[in-house]
Image (cartoon, rainbow, N blue to C red):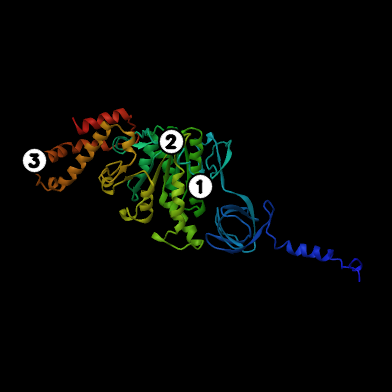
Amino acid sequence: MSLNKIHLPDVSPVSERLKKKLAFTIPVPSGAVYRGPILDVGRTLIKVSLPGVRMGELCRIEPNRILAEVVSIEQKTALLSPFSSCDGLYAGQWVSPLKYSHQVPVSMSLMGRILNGLGHPIDDGPGLGYHWRSLDNAPPDPLKRKPITDQLVTGIRSLDAILSCGEGQRIGIFAAAGVGKSTLLGMLCDGSDADVMVLALIGERGREVREFLEQVLTPKARQRTVVVVATSDRPALERLKGIYTATTIAEYFRDCGKKVVLMVDSLTRYARAAREIGLAAGEPPAAGSFPPSVFAQMPRLLERTGNSDLGSITAFYTVLVEGDDMNEPVADEVRSLLDGHIILSRKLAGAGHYPAIDIAASVSRIMPQIASSWHLEMAQKLRFILARYEEIELLVRVGEYQKGQDLEADDALKRYPAVCNFLKQKGGEHWALEKTLKMLEQTVIS
């Protein structure tokens, strides 16, 4: 039989049915609208069936219209961390991916405003003119960073004279609770010669936030300060995003050529929020019960500050030290990543010595690059006086010290009251650098 006379069956209907069946298994193309149901609801995370969703993508839960972010993906399911409470959510609700990650509005009109951890205004100010900026930005190219050559004048004698900070430096403020971290941050806001201040209050009590804004920050400082607030009662994701929001805003002003100071209180509470999300997502606990992702994210976050080829971000990060243990995991990791550390002493705070900076335990690694040789010599003399006095302090207190046997110790004993007076400073006092250095010379030489 000729092949031309063979009649093959019509398979078109089968092909159409096959296409319709395969449509449910073919991956959803980019840009298509799709959604998936909630499978489980926990206290902090939501499990959703969403094949094809991306890490860090925002999703909307219907009909509540609650936003959530993808924090973990396993095959066809994803774990979402909501921006608000999980109360009222139930299995079966539909979740729609939004095809973009979290962004915040930025503009010059942000100065003087108060935002929540997600970047939304929470004050009674006017609407903002803005454009959107992603929270996940790459650090500046290390080969394009300007070197740190100029000193940032803080108006605080102990910092400007002994722990000089450079424009673009990253400094940690390590302290236990109640030793004056907020007071020191307020003095930095008031006295710094920066163009813009960005302050992130992460995990603070609501009462303390209002007290800080109304009693610590002066009206003049408020005008050039952007405040980002994520109090301790907010969801873990908002507390986590608060520091990214503040960093993104600081980056915007740096890109505008401004000299920016970023202050974060505190980096420890950011790490705790990241731990809360990581452990709920199934990550294994590591050092201090913190999952590995906490220590993986932190270097990338801190590297985003500093100098670029356009401007500078000088960053101050407070770190809560539990039981005065400087070797606990977060404090130890942060100290290795920053360019200096300021230690606040419980003993000095108890004696009414503010700011309660432990000069002997604190260091600025950038100071040799930005201070003159004469300035470095004067600072070293003051450190030497404090060290020598500490050696003889017990003998002095019990009345056993005998003058004339050690001339250096005698000189330290004589100058110690003047040194303490130099290091103490009341809130609201702002000292010019020239005046500070002149007083330093009089304290250690005259």
* In contact (CB < 8 Å): disc 3 and disc 1: no
Q: Amino acid at mark 3?
A: Lys
Earlier in the chain: of badge 1 and badge 2, it is 1
Using residue 439 as the reference point, say whether residue 36 is left or right of it. right
Q: How packed is label 2: few (under 14 Cα within 10 Å), some, or many (20 or more)?
A: some
State which mark lies toward you, 3 or 1.
Answer: 3
Label 3 residue SS: loop
Q: How packed is label 1: few (under 14 Cα within 10 Å), some, or many (20 or more)?
A: many
What percent of the width, then of the height, locates residue 5? 92, 67
Q: Amino acid at mark 1?
A: Gly
What percent of the width, then of the height, locates residue 375? 27, 32
* In contact (CB < 8 Å): disc 1 and disc 2: no
Earlier in the chain: of badge 3 and badge 1, it is 1
Identify the mark at residue 117; answer none if there is no mark.
1
Q: Nearer the viewer, residue 116 or 249?
A: 249
State which mark lies toward you, 2 or 3.
Answer: 2
Identify the mark at residue 403; answer none if there is no mark.
3
Q: Nearer the viewer, residue 330 or 210?
A: 330
Task: Residue at the far front: name it.
Answer: 2
* Label 2, label 3: how far apart the Cα atoms are: 51 Å
Relative to 363, residue 445 above or below: above
Q: Nearer the viewer, residue 45 or 140?
A: 140
Write the residue at 17% across / 43% down.
388
Name the residue tied to disc 2. 146
Q: How packed is label 3: few (under 14 Cα within 10 Å), some, or many (20 or more)?
A: few
* In contact (CB < 8 Å): disc 2 and disc 3: no
Label 1 residue SS: loop
